[in-house]
Image (cartoon, rainbow, N blue to C red):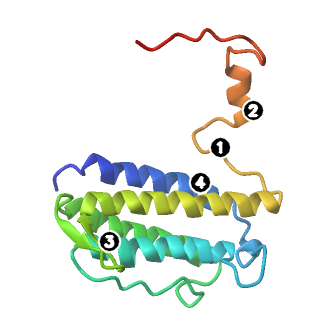
Amino acid sequence: MPESPELVRYFDRVRERTMRVVAVVPPHKVDWTFRQGKFTLGDLMRHLASIERWMFAENAAGRPSAYPGHGRELAGGYEAIVDYMQRMHAESMAIFESADLDARCRTPGGAEMPVRKWIRSMIEHEAHHRGQIYLYLSILEIPTPPLYGLTEEEVKARSKAEPGADLAIVPVK
């Protein structure tokens, strides 16, 4: 198989970062939500898996959305949800790797756009819901992994600029 386009490889790395935060979700909190009627942690995880495979990948392949939702019937319990996420991602990646990124696809809302733009939309969608998982875990006071390797405090400690220090402003010509 030819080498995957950079955009597809990039999405795979985005998913790896999502799975690092999913790995710290306590199994006994998978059905937790901050308010009745809102996504639970498990709902968010199932939603990411389902929407990637059954909407974004289907549309990228030129087919209509077959999104089944995010219900417990898709995968109940932490281990089953993680397995579902991994399976749906593997299936999606096979579709994305063989997709013509310059071809046009139709979204469920009826818009037409290049497949590469649709995949970029999926990446934004993933970041949005991953942020919700981080927030939920923060509310539960569960430590989360830093997104890119360092925490904000570690970045600050390693930075050279001191608080309140005058930084030279160089005019742009």
Q: Is residue 140 above or below residue 28?
A: above
| x then y, percent, for residue 24 | 69, 59
Name which of mark 3 and mark 4 comes first in the sequence: 4
Q: Amino acid at mark 2?
A: Glu
| x then y, percent, for residue 60 | 26, 69
Numbered label attached to residue 20: 4
**What residue sits right under mark 1 in the picture?**
146
Decide if residue 43 is in sight here: yes
Name which of mark 2 and mark 1 comes first in the sequence: 1
**Nearer to us: label 4 or label 1:** 1
Mark 3 Cα-neighbour bin, 10 Å: few <14, some 14–19, many ≥20: many
| x then y, percent, for residue 161 | 69, 15
Decide if residue 30 is on the left or right side of residue 16: right
**What residue sits right under mark 2 in the picture?**
153
Decide if residue 23 is in sight here: no
Q: Amino acid at mark 1?
A: Pro
Q: Nearer the viewer, residue 82 or 120?
A: 120
Mark 4 Cα-neighbour bin, 10 Å: few <14, some 14–19, many ≥20: some
Residue lying at 82% horizontally and 63% vertically, measured from the top left? 140
Name which of mark 3 and mark 2 comes first in the sequence: 3
**What residue sits right under mark 3 in the picture?**
57
